[in-house]
Amino acid sequence: MKTGKRMKGVVISKPIMYGNVATELLTRKTDHTHKWTVFLRGANGQDISYFIHKVEFKLHETFVNNNRTFKSPPFEVSETGWGEFEIITKIHFPPASGEKPISLYHMLKLYPPDSLGQSWPKGKPVNNFFYDELIFSEPTEEFYEILTKGANGPEIPLKTSGNHAFSVESEAAECKRLETAVGQVTGKHDEYKGRVRAAENEIALLRRDIAALESST
């Protein structure tokens, strides 16, 4: 019989993706300009409801029933509107987990980046996705069984595709970009450090020359 005992030294992570997708309305009957969907799902599009009890989405207070709760997938809300605002996604875990709810925050994004606004094709969705990992440190024995038995298939896709914005491939590419950036920053740091050293040497020579001139007068 399980007693809620926690498993010392055990850490389990579950990758998730959250955010929103928005599409401009080509025909409008109101002042609403976009249709959008805010969501929470597995990073590989897999079902994550086996370790999630319920998900709450808190929308702007101007929406009717601005607190939406879902106890089964899909964990998402679709609406229409014209403005961008902060959305709170609150994740609740099964009572047996002993875990407190976790809240995620993101700005609903309807419009493409300013640099692409003029050239953005009509009807093309604006994707505003975020990758994160839920970390469970020393889970209860009951929750450990839920987390390990419910997993089905790879949790992070190997390749990037239209359906998978985050993947092992994109992570490797991002690491490579970061390594390149670190190398560039390190190179500039060394360059400026050399300039400072040269300037300090020049200042020391000038001070020596000034002192020699003052002593000779």
Image (spheres, helix red, strand yellow):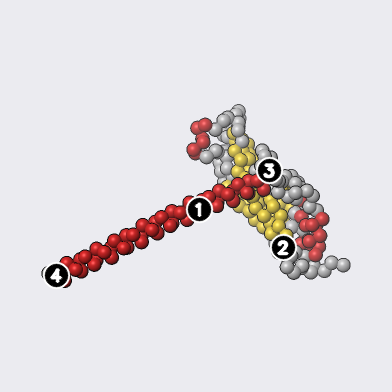
Q: Look at the numbered disc 3 and give the secondary structure of its residue.
A: loop
- Please state which amino acid type lies under the numbered disc 3: Lys
Please tell me whether mark 4 or mark 3 is closer to you in this view.
Answer: 4
Q: In the rendered structure, which disc, 4 or 2, sits on the residue that comes first in sequence?
A: 2
Give residue 68's position: percent from left, percent from top.
69, 48
Extreme left residue here? 217
In the picture, the disc for residue 159 is 3
Q: Nearer the viewer, residue 154 or 130?
A: 154
Which residue in the structure is indicated by mark 4? Answer: 216
Please tell me whether mark 2 or mark 3 is closer to you in this view.
Answer: 3
- Please state which amino acid type lies under the numbered disc 1: Gly
Kindly indicate whether the residue at mark 3 contacts the one at mark 2 (C-beta within 8 angstroms).
no
Q: CA distance from mark 1 to mark 4?
A: 50 Å
Identity of the residue drawn at 38% across and 58% down: 194
Identity of the residue drawn at 76% across and 55% down: 51
- In the picture, measured across the screen, residue 82 lies left or right of residue 132, that is left
Extreme right residue here? 1
